[in-house]
Amino acid sequence: MPMTDKEKVLEKLKKLLALSKSDNPHEASLALQRVQKLMQAYGITRDDIALSDIDESISNYWAAGSVNPPRYMLGLLGIIQAAFGVESIIHSGHKPSVGFYGNKDRVELASYTWDVLARQLITARKNHIGQQNKRIKSTTKTSRGDKFAEGWVLAVRSEVQLFAMTREERELAQLWLEQKYPDSGTTTGREAGKSRDADMSRHIGYREGENVRLHQPVSGHEQRKLGSGL
């Protein structure tokens, strides 16, 4: 069955399932009968109906350059997940990307917010590294940049209003992941290297991160506001 046709049937089934909970016994019985007939006719299961509410939105912005990213990038991913009640997966390849999956009404907003915040973080880290003494080793600069980014992310995390996933959403998201990406794994991320004044860089990053404001937009209009509000 073509995807568009299946989507139409799934939407019809969801409406009928809602009617099957009607206080009118006759209406509820008829709706349930139609649900059973449609499911049988199109080979659709209860899981298919539930999973139709799960979707993925992929962002092609992945500045880490690796599927084993620094921990500050994983920290930022965690913030987006917490803010929108979604999960994320890093897609490897020539140009790695990150996908946000979960409730289809929230994944696109999560992806957009990631684009905005990740770009700000990378720019702030680059500027901090650029302010370091040119005579110090590149590994020291990288370490200080990473610590700065960790502080920045820590400050942003304190601004997040949690949008926790329900148990049902989490279970559905896990089922969706197992079906679509059965070979996916996990990563703990790369730790920042050690260097002198690393704690100071982290503190500076935290101070800059305190200026970031993370909103939870609920519409296209709010999404447009997000670009200037962060």
Image: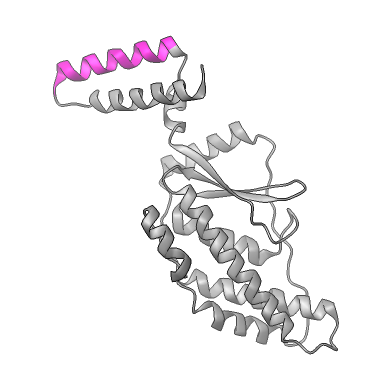
Is residue 170 shown to the viewer in this render? Answer: yes
Q: Nearer the viewer, residue 11 or 174?
A: 11
Residue at the location (29% across, 27% down)?
Answer: 15
59 lies above or below 143: above
Is residue 162 shown to the viewer in this render? Answer: no
Dividing the picture into quarters, in which one does residue 20 lie? top left
Residue at the location (41% across, 56% down)?
Answer: 163
56 lies above or below 7: below
Dividing the picture into quarters, in which one does residue 21 lie? top left
The number of numbered discs placed on residues in the rendered structure image is 0
Tell me where residue 215 appears, x and y as whole percent.
Answer: 41, 65
The part of the chain drawn in magenta is 24-41
Residue at the location (37% across, 27% down)?
Answer: 11
Residue at the location (57% across, 71% down)?
Answer: 153
Tell me where residue 127 appears, x and y as whole percent.
Answer: 68, 80
Tell me where residue 2 appears, x and y as whole percent.
Answer: 51, 20
Tell me where residue 140 appears, x and y as whole percent.
Answer: 80, 80
